[in-house]
Image: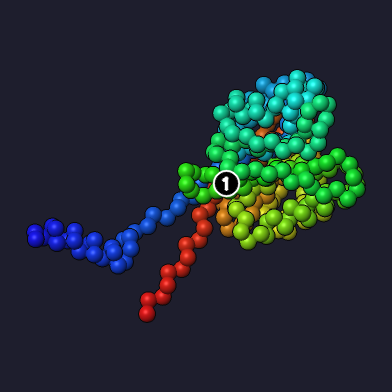
Amino acid sequence: MTRSWFWVATALVLGSFCGPLSVQAEEPIRLRVLSYNMNHGEGIDARIDLNRITAAIEAAQPDLIALQEVDRGMARTGRIDQARLLAGRLGMEHAFGENFAFLGGSFGNAVLSRRPITDHENHPLPAPSGGEPRGALSATVSLSDGGPAIRIISTQFDHRQDDRNRLASADWLATLAESPDALPTILAGDLNASPASPTVQTLGSRWTPASLRPLPTVPADAPRAAFDHLFVAPADRWSIVEVRALDAPEASDHRPLLLVLDWLPPPSPESPATP
């Protein structure tokens, strides 16, 4: 046996006992996430124009989009499936969650993604004081072929002054952050509540807010109210890079929020102690 073949054989034998000589660790994955109450495409000028919504989204170059107030098949918006139309224009996959039937169609939330959506489910939110049904659309997204998955939730809370529904919804969503087997999750939406409200404080007690300062988004032409919010969980699986309200004063009555963050791989298990 030549010397070179001796070292090859030795390496193979050692590998059979010791396993691979090195394992490549997973790297963080950068994501751009947009949360946008699109008001079914109706701007502050009362004109419905999905071209403006498309332009506002394209300018942000998002990987994931959580949309609220989306029409599907309604007479007022030409019986268009708005989520499907926007996804087609943007080259993305989509999921839609109907909250209630209205004007001959459906009204709800949507998720758009540049990466594969492998599962989705719309969860009706609790409504102890009645009112319009609200929901939380949860979508599972694969970040790479055979690689890690995350979850994104798009939601909108009750808008009325009575905050019982908002508090009940916050309590319900807060529990999702604590599930031990839950995927790393981004929660995005129009909560119709300010950062100092009991609703947002309830969520913030168990989710990590993406921003520690108010980001006004309403009204779009002169924002004063910070009703749109972004959260992540668990905190050790995400690193926030940037979050800001975008300059989109005409397309909707809300401005979109852009979140740039890194998905972090799970901590490596500790190596067993050598006897």
Image: 150 above or below 178 = above
User: Label 1's element?
Assistant: strand
Query: Residue 67 in the image: x percent, y percent?
Result: 70, 36
Query: Residue 175 in the image: x percent, y percent?
Result: 72, 57
Q: Nearer the viewer, residue 7 or 262?
A: 7
Q: Nearer the viewer, residue 257 or 40?
A: 40
Check disc 1: other Cα within 10 Å, few if <14, some if 14-19, many if 20+.
many
Q: Residue at x 74, y 32 (%)?
A: 70
Q: Nearer the viewer, residue 224 or 57?
A: 57
Image: 126 above or below 71 = below
The kind of residue on which mark 1 rests is: Leu
Q: Residue at x 68, y 56 (%)?
A: 177
Q: Quadrant of the C terminus?
A: bottom left
Query: Residue 189 in the image: x percent, y percent?
Result: 72, 42
Q: Quadrant of residue 134?
A: top right
Q: Residue at x 83, y 52 (%)?
A: 167
Q: Residue at x 80, y 22 (%)?
A: 76
Q: Quadrant of residue 204?
A: bottom right
Q: How many marks?
A: 1
Residue 173 lies left or right of residue 93; in this view the side is right
Residue positioned most to the left: 2
Q: Quadrant of the N terminus?
A: bottom left
Q: What colouring method underlies this structural image?
A: rainbow
| Residue 2 appears in view | yes
Query: Residue 97 in the image: x percent, y percent?
Result: 72, 38
Image: 32 above or below 22 = above
For disc 1, the marked residue is 261
| Residue 252 appears in view | no
